[in-house]
Amino acid sequence: MWAERTAALPRSARPRERPAKESLLLTEELIAQFLLEKERRGCVSDTVSGYRRHLLQLYQELPEDKEIRPGTLENWQSMLVEKGYAARTVNNWLSAANSLMEFCGRRELQVLDLPLPADDVQPELTRTEYLRLLSAARVLGKERAYLLVKVFACTGMTVRHLSLLTVEAVEENRLVLPVNGLRRIVHIPAPLRQELRDYIRREGISSGPVFVTRNGRQYNRTAVNAVIQSLARDARVSPEKCNPRCLRKLYRSTQESIQASFALLMEQAHERLLETEQLTTGWEGVNKYEM
């Protein structure tokens, strides 16, 4: 497709031929090596499958030489948009390609501009609204919805990691989440851990994921959103705010607020320490400092 576009241009408007060293040959073997490394680093199977699907699509749509050069991924981005793919879908595909370029040590070939569409901006869920969601779940007797709200707001985990919240992880109080190719250790807050243990005991869950459907399948994003949004009306919270992404956003903002308060306390404590030392060992003496 791209080769046809280039051939249709006047010779003066065609891209200049670049030295071979500037290009990267994309092969199915290279993609397989990349995916294997992702698995080794702890990526969940859904993420690896997504990478495989996106990268094979890129491979199929490349010109016959299968070379990725500066500007190649930008052209692919434009073509995907022209085909009518949603901005988030395009961003997911290009993010997979960027990750592959980083794996190959070719960051100069990455697409740097991956703006999120305006309709992807999530509204802010306040802590008061979060507490109303929990209260509504209690009044309605929806324990599973209550726990799901708490899990996302108290751990910052994503829907795709929900299957990693197992009976064993709750007992060990050690949730291992793959994040950007690394392993993030999450300790479940004590109040939430106790509630999860009580839920596990009452439901008779002996092992494996804590949250599964009636058929024993893993929850997907649509199902989780539906469970949480069932609380919206009674909690008087906009349905647009009742989803794991907004709850994770609340988790991050809460953590940032606590860290900022802690940093301020440290600064104030250090200032008081210096003032105390100045009173006893200051060069100009007590009277000078008090002025």
Image (cartoon, rainbow, N blue to C red):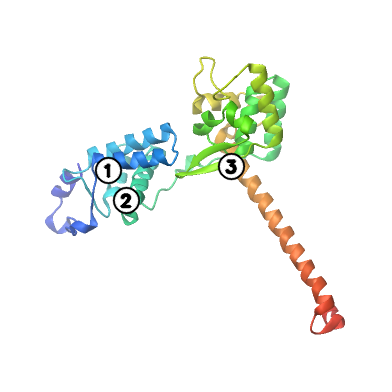
Q: Mark 1 or mark 3: name the one nearer the start of the chain.
A: 1
Q: Mark 3 or mark 2: name the one nearer the start of the chain.
A: 2
Q: In this figure, which residue is indicated by the disc labeled 3?
A: 249
The local secondary structure at tag 1 comes to helix
| Real-space CA distance between mark 1 and mark 3, rounded to the nearest whole angstrom | 36 Å
Mark 2, Cα crowd under 10 Å, few <14 / some 14-19 / many 20+, is: few
Q: Is residue 74 above or below residue 264?
A: above
Q: Where is residue 272 shown, x and y percent of the image? A: 79, 67
Identity of the residue drawn at 24% across and 53% down: 69
Mark 1, Cα crowd under 10 Å, few <14 / some 14-19 / many 20+, is: some
Q: Is residue 182 above or below residue 212?
A: below
Judge whether residue 195 can be spotted in this image: yes
Give the residue furthest to the top.
215
Amino acid under label 3? Answer: Lys
Mark 3, Cα crowd under 10 Å, few <14 / some 14-19 / many 20+, is: some
Q: Is residue 148 left or right of residue 285?
A: left
Identity of the residue drawn at 36% across and 48% down: 98
Q: Mark 2 or mark 1: name the one nearer the start of the chain.
A: 1
Q: Look at discs 3 and 2 and give the one toward the viewer.
A: 2
Rendered-image quadrant of the N terminus: top left
Q: Which labelled disc corresponds to residue 30?
A: 1
Q: Look at discs 1 and 3 and give the one toward the viewer.
A: 1
Q: In this figure, which residue is indicated by the disc labeled 2?
A: 104
Q: Is residue 169 above or below residue 290?
A: above
Whether residues under marks 1 and 3 lie with C-beta atoms below 8 angstroms apart, the answer is: no
Whether residues under marks 2 and 1 lie with C-beta atoms below 8 angstroms apart, the answer is: yes
Amino acid under label 2? Answer: Cys
For the image, the number of numbered tags is 3
Identity of the residue drawn at 76% across and 68% down: 271
Judge whether residue 238 can be spotted in this image: no
Rendered-image quadrant of the C terminus: bottom right
